[in-house]
Each structure stands twice: as structure tokens, then as C-alpha cells.
Image (cartoon, helix red, strand yellow):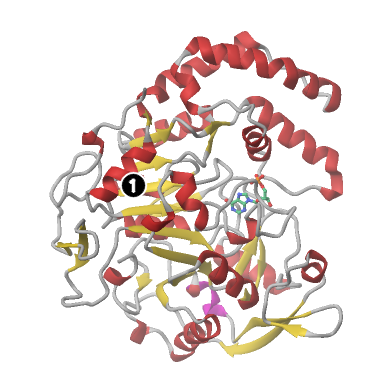
Amino acid sequence: MFPCQADDIPTRGSTGGVEGKDAPCGKFRRTLHTRCGRRARTPASLPGSKLEPMPATVIVGAQWGDEGKGKIVDLLAQDSDVVCRYQGGPNAGHTIVSGGETFKLHHVPSGILSGKLCVVGAGCVVDPGLLVAELDGLEERGISTAGVRISGNAHLIMPWHVAIDSASERRLGRLQIGTTRRGIGPAYADKAARIGIRVQDILDPKILRQKFETALSEKNVLLERMHGVEPLEVEELAERMEECAVRLRPSVADTSLLVDRALHEGQRVLLEGAQGTLLDLDHGTYPFVTSSNPLAGAAATGVGIGPTRIDRVLGVAKAYVTRVGEGPFPTEIQGPEEERVRDLGAEYGTTTGRERRCGWLDLVALRFAVRLNGMTSLVLTKLDVLSAFAEIPVCTRYRLPDGSETAEFPAHQSDFHHAEPVYESLPGWQATLGGAESLADLPDPARGYVRFVEEWLGVEVSLISIGAERDRVVAPHGLASVAG
Ligand code: IMP
């Protein structure tokens, strides 16, 4: 059995994290939850509010990933106790700028920079070597990783997964998906085939070695005969993995129990998605998707709590759209303006360094994301990037091959592949948003842009990000209301 010590869970009135220090500011006070009697937090700035805040909030990417979720999680983590990743692996790259320093996180939840308890849930896949490097890198920069807990049920990405990912992309040639080549698809495929190796297997070197022997008897045939890649050697692999295991063993925990206990304690839990809605294995732009479910619904299974424990779903969307990898992208900008958006937004992949494809805001796809995630509010990021443009096209409908127009995301992939964007042009503001602290400080056309999005989607924009630093945000209804 691996631990979920009671002292893993921050005590009431703590700022969270493993040390359980008293909250530095009196921003939040505790109230008794009237429905179930459990304790919940109420933003002190909303006295007498009828809307009782609840603790579990999902933060989900509303486009093709890279929406800026890391910054939002980092910001909301300040007033949270536990931050969990529920799917994906080192294909994710969350960039966070804090105190003038830039951090790029791949496995570890973004709450780590605020010293919170950080859970890597069962729905994730973990590359042990990369995780150890990430933890060591954080420690070297003075960030404690003592609060990291990894689900024993998460699956391991093994060297053969990485080799097969790259080899199959090569084999696919121009039909390739454009994966991050981190072994994500092959690792999730083995999980579904029930031949995966799990994090809990690193607890016993003998079991781990046996699993390597069994796996390699098949994978080496595949590597050599099908992909023409060098076979892997059990002994060398077992040695390499044992080094990682020594480092990771103390962090392996029953994270489902840990999160459940935290919720019972009335702690505030953030469930952090990786990738984005349109990369969802079931509902995204298949086959140009990832191999897990970024959708908010998957947060419950990915962490191991019931869906009724989730109270809020914050969708995060850029004020425009980017995509890395292959696949259809109706609002992709053709011509020099794409380069301009890419340069202004520094749109290069955090994980792979690839240029991101850039496009105008697609409200058809975003409406789809609102629906699929049951979004309770939207966070709009990188609004400042659009400041350079005199006119900003926004796609409100698709024109389908039969000439009809629709505001609904096409259910059939051929319709989507051939969909032409129908734009409305909104006035730009051509002024810096640099000093804005409230909605009223934004130029009229920028407020108009936000209002247009809200009206079209039927969902409130609760936070607008206007720069890379944590404090470069505008919260139209107050920061305390964003995650409850
Ligand atoms: P995989 O997840 O590496 O298998 O890649 C599948 C698709 O998802 C490719 O198009 C990748 O570019 C894309 N993808 C995976 N992770 C991310 C991410 O964190 N941000 C953006 N795109 C991603």
C-alpha cells in the first residue's frame, strides 16, 4: 500500500501546500456549506452572496491547447489548496512567468510555484526520466517539490513508447498527426490494451524488471521488424528506471483518497486540464487529437472523484486561436498577418519549439467547447496580442460544402474539413492594454470584443489576461468570483 497521509492535506485556514501555514491575507473566510454541512470558503469580498462558492473547479482548454491555462492555474492556485492534473503527460507545456522568471512545466501541476499540494492523477501518463528532470530543475531554482503526489494508477511512458511514436509518425509520412513525439499515443494504447506499466510498479524493483522482460519480448519485435529501430535491453532499462524510481517512490500516493479527503475538509481543489477540447480523443478533430480526454468531464475519472464533486468549469481560450501539429483549422490566417500574430504572441510550442499555426477567433468551435465542457465561465487570454490590429475578424459561422451556413460545430468530419469561416469584422483598439486594472480601463473596442464573445457564446467572461505576468489580468466581476 502506498500512503495518503492525513498530513498530506492542508489544514483548514491554511494557504494549502504541505506546510499548512496561515493564510497571508484575509481574502477568504470559511462558511458552513448549507446543503451538506461540509465547510466551504466564501470570498470575503462578496458578503451576503447567495451564490455559495464551492471548492472543486476544472480549468479546461477551450481550443487546441496552448490557451494559457498554466498562467490561470498559477493565478487561481494562490487561493487554492490542492492542484491536480487529470490527463496527458509531457506533451503538455505550461509556461508561467512569475517574479520575472519563466517556468515551463510539463508534468507537474502549475500550483507548484505557489507551494501547493500538486497531484498527478491516475488519468495521466508519466515519463519517469522527464519527471525526475523536471522536479530536479524546479528544486535547483529554489521551488520545493515536496508537495508533489503521483497516482500509483497513472501509466508510465517507456522508451519503447517514445520510439514507436516517432517511428509511426515517420511511417505515416504526409498523413502524420504531428504528435509531440513524447510517446503519448503508444502509452495510452498499452493502457487500453491492459498491458501498460503503472507508476505503482516502480515500488518493487523485482516486479518492474519482470514487467520490462514481458513487455520487451513483444516490443522489441515491433521495434526491430516493423520500425527498423534498435531493440531495448532489459538490464540497461532496469538500471536506468531504478535511478528514477528511487527519486519518485516517496511521491507515489493514493491520490484519489487524498483529493477526496481534501474536499471533505472543505479545501479548494483545482483540476488542471492539459491540451484542449478540440484535441479530445472522443470529441476533438479525430484523428488529429491527443490520446486522452482533456474535456472537463474527464477530470472526475482522471483524478478519481465523482462528477458531483465538481462545481465549476472554467474554459480558457485565447482571444485568437493557435494550433500545433496537423489537422483542419478553418480560421487559420493565410498570409503575412499570421506571422504578425505569431510574433506578437510568441507562438512557439513550449514542448517542441514548433511554430504554432495562428488564426482568428472561432466562435463556432468555442460554442462547441462551451457545450462539451458545461463551461460556467470563460477566461480570455492574450487579448493584448490583438492590440496591433485595426480590424479583427471573428468567425461566427461556417459555410458548409452544400452552401448552407451553420453556427454549430459540424458532426461529420468531411463537413468540418471543408468548412469555410464566415467572419464578422470588429473594430480594433490599437492601444496598449498595459496599465488596465479593471474592465473600465480597457478601450471601448476591447470591451466590445469581450462583450461580443460573451453574447455569442452565452457565457460570462470572468477573467481577461492582458500580459504574461501573473498580475496582468482584469476580472470584470472581481477575482474572488472566478473560481468561487
Ligand atoms: P500527442 O499528444 O503528442 O500524441 O500529439 C497529438 C496532437 O496533439 C498533435 O497535434 C500535438 O501537436 C497536439 N498536442 C499535444 N499536446 C499539446 C499541447 O500541450 N498543446 C498543444 N497541442 C498539443
Element type at marker 1?
helix
Does residue 391 appear left or right of residue 413 in this picture? left
Q: Residue furthest front?
A: 36
Q: Is residue 98 visible?
A: no
For the point 43% across and 87% down, which residue is it?
Answer: 443
The dominant secondary structure in magenta is helix
Quadrant for the C terminus in the image: bottom left
| Image: magenta residue range | 384-388
Whole-percent x, y for residue 376 in the image: 43, 71
Q: Nearer the viewer, residue 243 or 139?
A: 243
- The stretch drawn in magenta includes residue 227: no
Is residue 192 visible in the rendered structure shown here?
Answer: yes
Q: Eyeballing the image, is 57 above or below 246?
A: below
Question: Relative to residue 76, is residue 196 depicted above or below?
Answer: above
Q: Is mark 1 within 8 Å of ligand 1?
A: no
Q: Residue at x 15, y 45 (%)?
A: 21
> How many numbered marks have been drawn onto this rendered protein structure?
1
Picture coordinates of residue 41, whole percent (x, y):
21, 61
Q: Determine the residue positioned at 61% across, 71% down.
A: 368
Instruction: Please tell me which residue lies in front, 114 or 184.
Output: 184
How would you rate the neighbour count of disc 1 (Cα within 10 Å): few for under 14, some for 14-19, many for 20 or more?
many
Q: Amino acid at mark 1?
A: Leu
Q: Position of residue 225 (x, y in %)?
A: 85, 22
Q: Is residue 442 above or below residue 176?
A: below
Q: Position of residue 433 (x, y in %)?
A: 42, 78
Residue 158 is drawn in which quadrant? Answer: top right
Classify the position of the N terminus by image quarter: top left
Q: Which residue corresponds to mark 1?
A: 113
